[in-house]
Amino acid sequence: MVTIDEPAPKKLNVALVRPPIFFKRHGLANEATPCLGLAYISGYLKKYGYSPVFIDGIAEALNKVWEPEMYPEFLCQGLTFDEVIRRIPNQTDVICVTAMFSGEWPFVRDLINQIREQFPDAVIIAGGEHITALPDYCLKDCNGLDVCVLGEGEHKCYEILEVISNEGAYGDIAGIGYLNEAGEYVQTSTSLPRIRDIDSIPWPDWPEGYLEKFWAAGKSFGPQSARDMPMMFSRGCPYQCTFCSNPNMWTTRYILRDIDDVLAEVKSYIKDYNITAVQLYDLTAITKKRWIKEFLSELKRQDIKVQWDFPSGTRSEILDEETLSNLKDAGTNYLCFAPESGSPNMLEKLKKRIDLNKMTDAMKIAKKLGLVVRANTIIGFPGEKRRDTMRTLFYGVKLSIMGVDELQPYIFMPYPGSELFGKLAAEGKIDVNDDYFFSLSGLNSDLLSFSPLTFNEQMGPRELALYRLLFTMLTYGLSYLLYPSRIVRTVRNLISNEDATTVFEHRLKDAFRRKKISP
């Protein structure tokens, strides 16, 4: 982390706002985790003399679930809109709102509009994956929104604040979108500028007592230990999978952090927070063999002892037995692989660029070494034949028999910003509106829904939903029947309020907790 002189304090009053979380009543998914994005922005703004107020609508009421009056099919976890707004200081000049998930956009829009009613003179900025994918739509759909930050947010948020302070023009800032006086959408650059020197970015700024709220409530991104810390080794992803919004959000530039900087950050968390595990939020954490080899060597040399979890899904090109063994020795506990499909034909269409046999071998080695392994698969892509779907489903069965701990087939979700979304929208198969966003919200969290949003020409919603349910039951059933010690582990973890070895266990614990506090 770069050391700089104490900056002169800035005059603008800034608030960083994360909305409460919204989810289907019967859904298992729950993203009630620390907000790494806003923590990075807070650290960056403080580096340049600003003193942002950090308002996390989830963290400040993790044990509160309420019913949104306008949306009876959903529940909300966290603060109510009124409570969020009351926490924004009266003299706030700029309000930055994060909007990551398209399924939550109607709720985020409503919150922004209510903030606007209370702060008519403030500049309201929004950023995140959803905003980057649909900035024109968001600005026209949300009257309270002034500026959209596209892609990485740290430097753009800072530049917007400087322009406001100096009464400059938004057009001087690359990578943002706004409406001009005629109500026309303006995007200041067609390509998104990236931060090349990511080691110059300050570490995340975690408010005092913030992380402890998540730890006390047993909330984390993947599996769960007592004190999980979110981190990133890298930014971006060099691949161009057609179902992923990464190329739109991050471009295909993949940048790894300096190893010494990563290790210094980890050691600071061990010292300051007594963390038990690091959870990597990277899109593609394990890609460069030389980097991971040197990193693991330094972990051993410096005797850094902490658990490592990779819940986001990784590739297998460099995961040979030596690398996996070194990962295990360094404390790695959980590794998620992302084959996505068991059909070579579909992998080629999706531009996935993996060798399925090598990935299968890597999972087999990981299980032999005692790692907890998850595999992600997707069915129902546009253009996918029924035989391709069957190959994917039975590939999942094969992995479960082989010992992979958890595998759930997901139904294809057309993420805004992805290549497939653009194609479907251009063909008139997607109407971007609230109904579409709500369909995304519950698409893969409610396994008992038999009317999901689908875009496959051969298989309808009911057929795909039936495959999803049956093969989820089959893969998890095989996992427990063939490896009965997992039954004992899961029961123990569900009874205790401590660890969750798998994401499945964590989601079950979340569901039980929410049931107790839900209206």
Image (cartoon, rainbow, N blue to C red):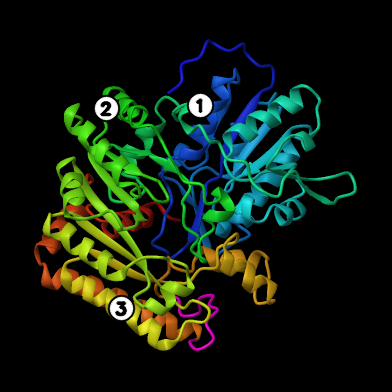
Q: Residue 43 carries which label?
A: 1
SS class of the residue under badge 2? helix
**C-alpha gap between disc 2 and disc 3:** 40 Å
List x then y, in percent, for residue 350: 47, 70
Q: In this view, does 18 lie above or below 141?
A: above
Q: Say whether residue 195 is left or right of residue 344.
A: right
Q: For mark 2, what is the residue? A: 270
Secondary structure mostly seen in the magenta stretch: loop
For the N terminus, which image quadrant? top left
- Read off the residue under disc 3: 471
Can residue 138 be seen by looking at this rendering?
yes
Amino acid under disc 2 = Ile
Q: How crowded is mark 2: few (under 14 residues within 10 Å), some or many (20 or more)?
A: some
Rate crowding at label 3 as few (under 14), some (14 to 19) or many (20 or more) other CA atoms within 10 Å.
some
In the foreground, 463 or 6: 6
**Viewport quadrant of the C terminus:** bottom left
| 410 to the left or right of 397 | right
Query: Looking at the image, which residue is at 63% across and 50% down?
Result: 131
Magenta residues, start to end: 449-459
For image coordinates 47% across by 46% down, the residue present is 254
Q: Quadrant of residue 353?
A: bottom left
**Mark 1 and 3 residues: CB-CB less than 8 Å, in contact?**
no
